[in-house]
Image: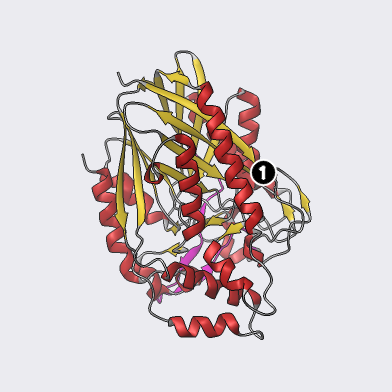
Amino acid sequence: MSRLHLARFKVDTQIPLGHPLCGGWIAPAAAITEPLYAQGVVLLGEEAPIVLCAVDWCGINNDAFRVWTEKLAQAAHTTPERVAVHCVHQHNAPFADLAAEARIARQKGLSSSLDVRWFEQVVQRVAETIREALGQTEKVTHIGLGQAPVEKVASNRRVIGPDGKIRWWRGSSCRDAEARAQPEGLIDPLLKSVQFWNDDRLLAVLHYYACHPMSYYGDGLVTSDFVGLAREARTKETETPHLYFTGCAGDIAAGKYNDGDKPNRFLLARRIYEAMRIAEQKAERVPLGNATWKTQPIRLPSLTSPTDEELERTLADEKANRAVRARAAMQLSFRARRDRPIVLSCLRLGEAVRIVHLPGEPFVEFQLHAQKCSPQRFVAVAGYGDGGPWYIPTASAYAEGGYEPSASFVSPEAEKPLREALRVLLAD
């Protein structure tokens, strides 16, 4: 049996009032409804340490993501490629892109997307907490694997009409009764849970589910939303840390089951909570086996239109919409990293478990593809790692139209290398 120890960490990122939310495209932070946490585990075994971290932020892109992985790697005495940082992707939360913010700061009449000093302080506090946690590790003897369907939460945002184009679109909330009446569409209905045990002591639980984690947003009330409510309820009830990772939810949201009324946040939270509870209750405890880490660098081809020059003009246009200008800055930030690949990773726990870590907002098809690459195993997928690419749709989605392809920074050709990278990561 592999020798594995686990350290746990949890940090309130303490977003200051007045800070931009979702990159400054919605109302800034006016009040804190729930804390936004950065929390995770460090696995110490026969290989170099592995860090898994879930952050209650909207996105961490490009150089900002590099800073997170480098600082956490230093704290854990490992390398950045062995650090998986993932945003849960709530929208009433910060959005960090350092290179984009530097471009924004040079413009007239364009408000900030990020307090860089605060960002650096948060990362430093997380790193310091990891250093302290390494002095309190516990032995891992077994893992527990469970899954349960989530009832009436996820639905595909994109409903295709007879002409092969988007006919209805359902976001995190949807007040169009006709759109809500359409079928769920393609989703992954299962929430998956991975437990770490020291004999009869439960050390931590990691949950994975593919759905945009918002019930409503834009009101300036900082919140971890329904997934955070469910996660913290389980943490309090079991007195054990629970982490939540959003899967490939680029085209998945709660719109079919959520008309945006405020009580729905608690209804959705209850449904996630029940799936967590059942998955944990039904979990099968299995021997740990070897804990190994595999990486696969990948370059996702960027869109060629608009050109860099056109994006620069949009960014400088004082008459343009603030969100459009800031988006241009983030697209330029992604293009500037052409020579630095995105690193995908896979945590292997013995023969039974594969946990895959992906960038951006991938469509659910990539999560289902990962499961098909290793059908005999328990495969969990975390999206929303390096957010540089923004949406990662399937190639066919560009012809179908709709919001996601229009907001993506990668071309339709990105599907093929991503599918191939998943195949390589999950190969025996």
Direction top: furthest residue: 200
Determine the image quadrant of residue 151.
Answer: top right
How far from the left and from the top, in percent, is residue 172?
60, 58
Image position of 365 (left or right of 200): left
The N terminus is located in which quarter? Answer: top left
| Residue at mark 1 | 267
How far from the left and from the top, in percent, is residue 161?
45, 72
The question of residue 155 being in magenta is answered with: yes
Determine the image quadrant of residue 396.
Answer: bottom left
Determine the image quadrant of residue 374.
Answer: top left
The question of residue 411 being in magenta is answered with: no
How far from the left and from the top, in percent, is residue 23?
62, 63
Amino acid type at mark 1 = Leu
Residue at point 59% right, 77% down?
325
Residue at point 32% right, 26% down?
46
Which range of residues does the magenta coloring cover?
148-174
Residue at point 67% right, 75% down?
110
Q: Secondary structure at mark 1?
A: helix
Q: Residues within 10 Å of mark 1 (few under 14, many from 20)?
A: some
